[in-house]
Amino acid sequence: MDTIRFSLMPRLAKPVNLPPADAAKLQAIVKKGTHKSRKIARARALLAMSSGKGAAAVQAEGGISPTQYYRLKRRYLAGGLAQALEERPRSGQPPKVTPALEARITSLACSELPTGAARWTLSLLNETLVSLDYGPAVSKETIRQVLKKATSSPG
């Protein structure tokens, strides 16, 4: 009868060896600090991985969870620096208010009032948008936010 032998030796983890160009890019991201906080945390963690620190030390220094550590390491080893640092696209519903619809709402609010109205209200803007077939009906709060954005934008 054949016996099956299992190895009790742990599997050695692949080290992360950063080329000097990648290390310089990561140092610039961490030093500059103008990137998203998740990107900075990933950069810190990759720098710690390349310096030979253990998983627990990298997680503490980078401020990441064990799952994030292993995913980041796998993404770097599989696809390089760009794939490890950047966010992957997320699923979800696309926004209902497009830039074109924002422009139409703003131009409608700046246009002549309809007869019998003293001023543009959010409800009146919404009704007019739908009646002119500019787009789907949106909430009054959405229209308010679009108009607030238009009045507070510089330039």
Image (cartoon, helix red, strand yellow):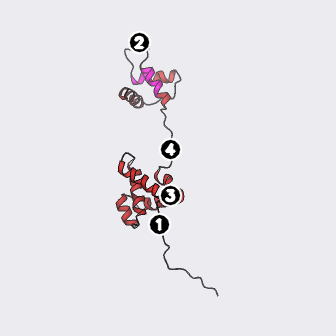
- Judging by the rendered image, the residue that carries numbered circle 4 is 92
> Cβ–Cβ below 8 Å for labels 2 and 3?
no
Mark 1 surroundings: few (<14), some (14-19) or many (≥20) residues within 10 A: few
- Quarter of the rendering occupied by the N terminus: bottom right
Q: Which residue is mark 3?
A: 75
The number of numbered discs placed on residues in the rendered structure image is 4
Q: Determine whether the residue tagged by mark 3 lies in a helix, strand or loop.
A: helix
Q: Residue at x 46, y 55 (%)?
A: 22
Sequence-first disc among 2 and 3: 3
- Residue 106 is inside the magenta segment: yes
Residue 101 placement (x, y as % from top left): 49, 28
Question: Where's residue 136, x and y in %?
Answer: 51, 29
The residue shown at (41%, 19%) is 110
Category of crowding for the residue at label 4, using alpha-carbon neighbours closer than 10 angstroms: few (below 14), some (14–19), many (at least 20): few
Q: Residue 37 or 131: which is nearer the viewer?
A: 37
Question: Which x, y percent locates residue 18?
Answer: 46, 60
Looking at the image, do the residues carrying marks 2 and 4 touch, with CB atoms under 8 Å apart?
no
Give the magenta-colored segment's residue range: 102-125
Q: Is residue 37 left or right of residue 10?
A: left
Who's the residue at 35% across and 62% down the image?
Answer: 60
- Distance, label 2 to label 4, CA atoms, is 42 Å
Tell me the quadrant of the picture where the C terminus can be found. top left
Q: Nearer the viewer, residue 79 or 106?
A: 79
Q: According to the image, label 2 marks what residue?
A: 116
Check residue 71 for magenta coloring.
no
Q: Secondary structure at mark 2?
A: loop
Sequence order check, earlier mark of 4 and 3: 3
Q: Amino acid at mark 2?
A: Gly
124, above or below 6, in the image: above
Q: Secondary structure at mark 1?
A: loop
Image coordinates for residue 107, horizontal then vertical, percent? 45, 21
Pointers 2 and 1 in contact (CB under 8 A)? no
